Amino acid sequence: MAEQGGAGGPRWSQATYTLDQGWRVQLQAGEPTQAEIGFVTASAVTSFGSHVRLSDFPAAAELEARPLRLMHLASVDGSAVYLQSSEAGADSTGRPDNVYNHVVFDRRPHEPEPPLRPVELWRSPDLLTPFSHLEVAAARLRAAGIPQRGAVVTLDSVVSFVCDPSTWRAGVLSVLMDASVAALRGGPPVVLIADSQDTGALWLGSVQRLMAPSTARTLSWSLYERASSLGAAWARGVHIAVVPRIDACERSAFAGAVVIDEAEIPAVGQAGGEPHVTAAGSEVAASNWSGAAQMVLVDDEVARRVLVVLDEAVLRVGDRGLAPEWPLAMAVVLLGDETMDARDEASRVLLDASPDGIRQDLDLYERTVAVVSSSIGSTTWGVWRELDARDTRSSLLIRELMGSAYLERCVSDAEWLLRDEGVPLPDQALLDADRERLTALAEAAIADLARPVDPREPVTSAVHALRLLDVVVRAGLLGADVGRTGPATATLLRTVAELLVGERGIAVAARAGVMSLPLRERLIVELEAVPVQREPVPGGAAPEEVLRWLAGDGQLLPSIRERMSGPLTALPPVQLSLAMLLLREGVPVTGLTATVAYSLLSEHAVWEQIPAVDRRALVRAAALPGAVLPTEFAALEEEFGGQFPEEFVAAALASAPMGDALSGLARRVQVSRPGLPSARFALVRLAMSQSATGELVPAQHVLELRDAVVAMRAAAAPAPVAADVGPRYLAAVVSVLGEVPFSREWRPSLERVLRTEAASGDARRAAAAATTLSFLAAEDPADHLDAEIALIRTFSDASEGAEERLRTRLESGAQAPRHALGLARLAFVTSDDFPDPSFVDPRAHALAALTVSDGAGRTIRLLDRPLRELAAQGDLDPEAVTAVLVDQLRAVVTVRGAVGGDKLLTAIERSAKVWQRELKGPRPRGSFRDGLASFLTDRKER
């Protein structure tokens, strides 16, 4: 129920509901909330449906024996409610069959005190059962808090009931116990057919007495449900319903439920074997809990002691969140020899259900540890098998105890450590509770191995040492730095490292298998310290098989990556060998190529002296996108100026994005490589960088831009040219639509590269190369122009970038109106309706063919989209722009003096109106509008 009393309010509240001058809430205590009152009015019984008909004037004994319905419902929100209903005779108007409902709300049933088991409230004197309208009117609540317990379900009565020598009840109790817990965990509900409500209450009391009080408060049940009302009871969440025997024949109403008759002798099952089977044919999985109960509930004295010790154990660990089975199992263990017959079942329960709270009670903890130790396998494999098979939802405490027992045996079991399948480990969290003791055991095992390698079996000794260290590291027992854990560990690592650098290291690596990262990192440190017997070869500090084993998953080790995070430095031999291994395999790691190049040149001083295989690996790696950052290349050029091949530098200059890093590299290249092609690349990229503020690319840079784009595409292959080069080239052509001669300086080298590209298997690259070749081969001006237009089209994939630069110019800066008008003229004269194509440079048509998305899934010309967006925003007035453009074109037509000029002007004006409608949008609204309007007015007046 929502809106219930918080932690500071009263735990208990009560309300009664009856027919007293209409159905209404009669009495209240404990300040019931609106939600609780709503529950009372919605859930109260208004028609009792008793199977016993009372006489017209019932005597006290008849009233005492009349059926009562007591229901306990545990809510999903953590609260609970007790609803007692009883026949109340006629109301004040003489209407018969009134029902009196007394509802008690427990807002915090999870609190351990008082240790109440709900069925103990059966026949509580504080739960009102008035009969007749006079008693109903005179009824008064007797207690504002928890009602007084009844006299039917007590410790003594439960012991006498289950141990009654005249009636064997262990079978029904076993089935009821297991069926109840199954229902509590989502299984089918339970129908208990009883001869009387009191015996039904005692059956429920027996089950609840065998679990902790707070666990019993999570069980929902109803004492007295007719077969016809079972569906409603199940809908309310009832787990167990006690049904009078008169309804036992209503089998159809029991569908889907476990049916137990208190008078039957069921077939009792066995945990892990055959299930219980009731007379009605219901099957219930047997448990060790019910098995233990069968063993101890046979004698009054033993049963009483078991139940008393059970409650004491619950108090010692704290009554919260306990599994139903655990308290009885713990009581069996605590009673020792007195309950020895149930020891096996209890031990299995403790292995599954022991709570974490045992840690706070040393006696209970030690007894549980003893049970675990005697129950798990006697070998390392047996312990691991038991631990690995456990459900992760089972007792954390037991899994921790098993984890500790496994690791204790593992570190001292050489045969287990050397197994071909590797050494499994539990989660580190399972070892935390016993970490100090396990660490001492691990250190002792390491010290025992820290001795000279057995010369007869050096490989086996080394693998044994590695496996032990790996287990200890993975278990988190050596801390973050493996090398700082004492002389024994250092000695062991040093001994293994001496084997790894030689040929026997190959066998060690193969047998040892995958090792943890901290151990591999420490082994690298030890390998660097091993005295070399011969002149070291860069990249060959250990056998390649050992290097691959140290590399592990093929990723760069953190220690090497850390050295690469600062200024370029030379790597020590083993780290360099590992880095070169990744480089040769093409693993893309930022900084790796530059670091290896720096290390190799530090060793050889001259590029040509580096072994050819390593030079080829460096060249391939440098061609990958982003393999060498501009800042790294600048540092390499500064340290080893001019040593690297031109293609290295060309790739870096072509693929680097604009920014300070590129500018620094370009300036360094001009100093270190004067007169070389890369120096020209550097000049062009500097020029492009200087125009990055939003200004149009100056006309004098168009030649350099165009040459550089083509040349860098060739020189940087297969690395891609930086994303901003293509858009800048388009921006340059938009800015300067004039005749510019093409430089032939790059022809020989370009043609060689382009022919290779044209023959490649990549269709896109081959097409671009073929187009560029036709551009280079063109001699006739007309052919040259066509080839240049085709080259422009190869940059169509960069249209979006060009559009962004155009929009930037059109939306900011003092020159924005001029840029807007220039773009508008280019868009207008290349539109489909413009009447005279002679006004348009052929390259402008090529630009007009470039398209972009309009954001709504349609395509639009690159030249139109910025203008349409400005018009839609109110930052561009189509009428004013069109008027100025028509005036400009009228002047051009007049200067030409061609025949038919008037008709052409009329056609231009008509075309302008069509174009204007396409751009029309809301009226201007801002400062850009004012600036553009003023600019257009001045132009028109002039």
Image: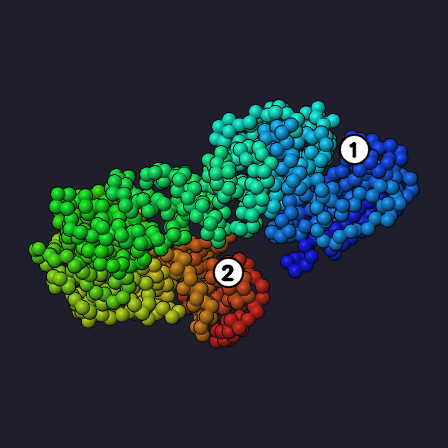
Question: Could you tell whether 829 is left or right of 535 in the image?
Answer: right
Question: Could you tell whether 878 is left or right of 80 in the image?
Answer: left
C-beta proximity under 8 Å, tags 2 and 1: no
Asked whether 641 or 59 is in front, the reply is: 59
Residue 689 rendering spot, x and y as whole percentages: 32, 68
Asked whether 761 or 877 is in front, the reply is: 761
Asked whether 784 or 897 is in front, the reply is: 784
- Name which residue type carries label 2: Arg
- In the rendered image, which residue does mark 1 sit on? 50
The relative height of residue 176 versus residue 556 in the rendered view (above or below) is above
Q: Residues within 10 Å of mark 2 (few under 14, many from 20)?
A: some
- In the rendered image, which residue does mark 2 sit on? 868
Asked whether 498 or 451 is in front, the reply is: 451
Q: What residue is at 22 percent from the left and 70 percent from the top?
A: 668
Question: Could you tell whether 582 is left or right of 844 in the image?
Answer: left
Q: What residue is at 23 percent from the left and 48 percent from the top?
A: 466
Question: Could you tell whether 248 is left or right of 694 in the image?
Answer: right
